[in-house]
Image: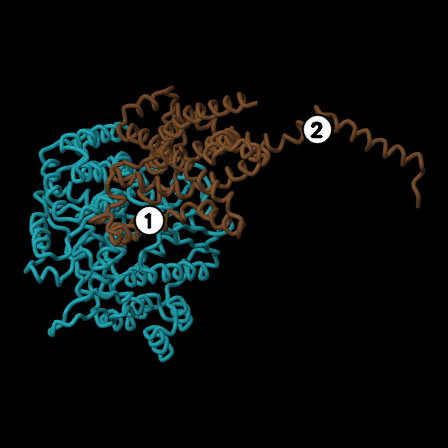
Chain colours: A brown, B cyan
Amino acid sequence: MQSSPTAETKKISKLEQFSIWFNQEKILGPALVAPAVLILLLLIAYPFCVAIWLSMTDKVIARSDTGNFIWFANFTKLFKDSIFQRTTINTFNYALVSVFFKLILGLLMALVLDEVKIFKNFFRGILLLPWIVPTSLSALGFLWMFDSQFSILNRFLLDWGLIQEKIIWLGTPATAMISVQLVNIWRGIPFFGISLLAGLQSIPQELYEAADIDGASAWSKFWNVTFPLLMPVTAVVTLFSIVQTFADFQIVYVLTRGGPVNSTHLFATLTHQTAILAGRLGEGAAVSLFMFPILVIAVILQLRYLQNQD
Amino acid sequence: MKERKDLTNRLQNGKISRRDFIKLMLATGASATAIGGVLAACAPEPAATAVATSAATEAVAAATEAVAKPLSVEGKLTMKLRAAFMPQGNEILKVIVEDWGQKNNIPVEVDITSMNDLQTIAATAAETGAGPDIIEINQGSAHLFAEKLADVSDVCDDLGSRYGGFYTAAEEACKVNGAWLSVPRFFAPHAISYRTDHFATIGASVPKTWEELYEIGKALVDAGLPPIAFPLGHAVGDGNDFNYSVLWSHGASDVASDGKTVTIDSVETRAAIEYMQRLFSVMPADTLSYDDASNNRAFLASAISATNNASTIWGAARNQSTKYKTKDADGKEVEKNLHEVTDHFVYPEGPAGRVTYAEFMSSAVFSYSKNVDAAKALLTYLNEREQLTPWVNPNLGFVFPTLMGVKDDLLMPWNTTPKLAPFKDYAETSHLPGFPSTNFRSGTDAYAKWVVVDMFASVCGGLASVDDAIATAKALLEESYKA
């Protein structure tokens, strides 16, 4: 049975009407963005607002009452708390040193990978491994490597005559911090390496050819062509890395639990200890929010830089 | 009977897995008690627990009947239990729970997980009001989660009246304002594991006091033998156990009996720190980085001569036939079984006698649970003698019952195996952080912050002077006990 021609035109025109209406930018744009915004609101904005609220209450875990509103008492208390003071220094030390080395070594990795012409994908693949392996698993592997009795690192260093006696990697504040930083750097290099490699490959070859004609040295080509053109990618990658490293948890939790004597506690591990183990949600939220202003400053600096580039 | 003997032979010869063994034995109608006894005896050195086997096989008690009142659950009865370090103990526990589920026609889901994960699971469950029906929680956590826990006083009163009451530490941990909010489950009792051969070489006998232990440590170093080693790192079980025990047995404490006044700045604390510094001088420096597994590894590798631990070092050495190297009469290097030269002694006494830290677990039923009655029935069942014995026995001393009346049972490992005897009286001298007060809520807070461990560690590691370490601890404790 065929539908009458008039009905069909009517149907099509209705569909068309909808399609014309939907294709307007002011409708289509928001509609496409809506799912992402919804997810952000639900998973980022809502918990974030709750955390701000919690940080200004004396809420304790597993109590029915929502806690008393105490303004900034948690924050002022933290300023006087010796563990928190130590944690702040640790977090800055951990993040800044790690990101610095990740950037330098990641850049080196990108430059080398860019030159590799054989088995290109193979090398890129295996160098990405540290980044792909779940952090807690690789941290467990490092726990063995740093073990005071059976450390393979010590074994090599002793055999090569670089040290005279065993280093107690996780037992003194300085070496424990270096150890957790080493793991973080090891894990983060591929992220920098691969991102910067993509940046390198987007630099037009003509610029290098022009530089060659001008008789530029390798160093001068790097400094005058590669470096400035790589800067936007570097800025974004560094921003991401700073955010992630400041909020790091797993490596320290697995390797030291913040010890010895709180010398490797980071904001995130102290938050876990305060909010979950000691049950003081309000204070724990305040610890985690201390990261926030630092990260905002980092984001603003980077964004401003990118805008200037445009 | 012949069938069971065959199965036992196959287990002993390694031809059948423990899990299959338990299942097949149950199928022959053997009681869990008998199976537990065989499992305990079937580690590589059966001689030590031969008593257990014969006694166990004779004690084939009638299978426990299902609980009279029919139980029902909504969905499944779910639980998260702490993994013991003895695999055979976890296996039989699972079977006992599943067996109960079958008898009562209740679907059960048991998950055996590590202690550190349990605490996060419990905190999340308490805060969100959703999660497993039963969660095993550690130390004084019942005080932390009090408002979200179901009252289990009827279960505890019933068990207590039948089995001689609970130990003080169990009551400290689970009784909040007069009501039982968690069913005491087990202590992981500690003693000092030591090398009998090294002690013999220097002519040392078992030390009665901390002072004597230091002398032994010094003699071992002087003789060039592996040193004593006690954890000063963030080792949840062993670190707290050792450091709190040293503090308390020197007559010091973090808080007064009123639960408010911080008493860490005392002559006794100074004496304890002074002692710890001396002890550290004869210990390897890496004890500052020890986690709960480090001392086990070091002992099993013959790198240390003594450390504090549950019975698991000896148990693992026995389970895995760990070897150590020594010289025979002709001076030839030979390998021997480590567990033969491993023994235990009770924690030494300080000026204030023997006071020890309780490493303790209890089973909490969360009030969000729709299956509170079934959970209570299961917890009663699990802690009855008939089910307690087959589970405690193959754990070879790693778990210690919280009911006072069962420790003298013939089948308990410390009564069948002389090397486990030092664990028998551990629970009597044990307490929770917050002792000598009853403010275990704040005591747990201070414990979570590692205040006591870090106080000792910072002085031993040269990070702080005695005065500074005490001042730091005091400030942190005042925060904890203010709440």
Q: Which residue is found at the position 46% from the left and 51% from the top?
A: B77
Q: Which residue is found at the position 19% from the left and 43% from the top?
A: B243
As drawn, B191 above or below B458: below
Percent across and percent down for residue B373 are: 42, 49
Q: Nearer the viewer, residue A250 or B89?
A: A250
Q: Around disc 2, counting alpha carbons within 10 Å, would you say few (fewer than 14), some (14 to 19), or many (20 or more)? A: few
Residue A143 is labelled as: 1
Asked which secondary structure carries label 2, the reply is: helix
Q: Chain of mark 1?
A: A
In which quadrant will I find the C terminus of chain B? Answer: top left
Residue most toward the bottom? B2
Residue A28 is labelled as: 2
Q: Which residue is found at the position 32% from the left and 36% from the top?
A: A265
Task: Kindly report the distance in space between the C-alpha atoms of the residues bearing marks 1 and 2.
Answer: 52 Å
Residue B28 is labelled as: none
Q: Nearer the viewer, residue A87 or B189?
A: A87
In which quadrant will I find the N terminus of chain B? Answer: bottom left
Q: Nearer the viewer, residue B258 or B63?
A: B258
Amino acid found under the numbered disc labelled 1: Leu
Q: Chain of mark 2?
A: A
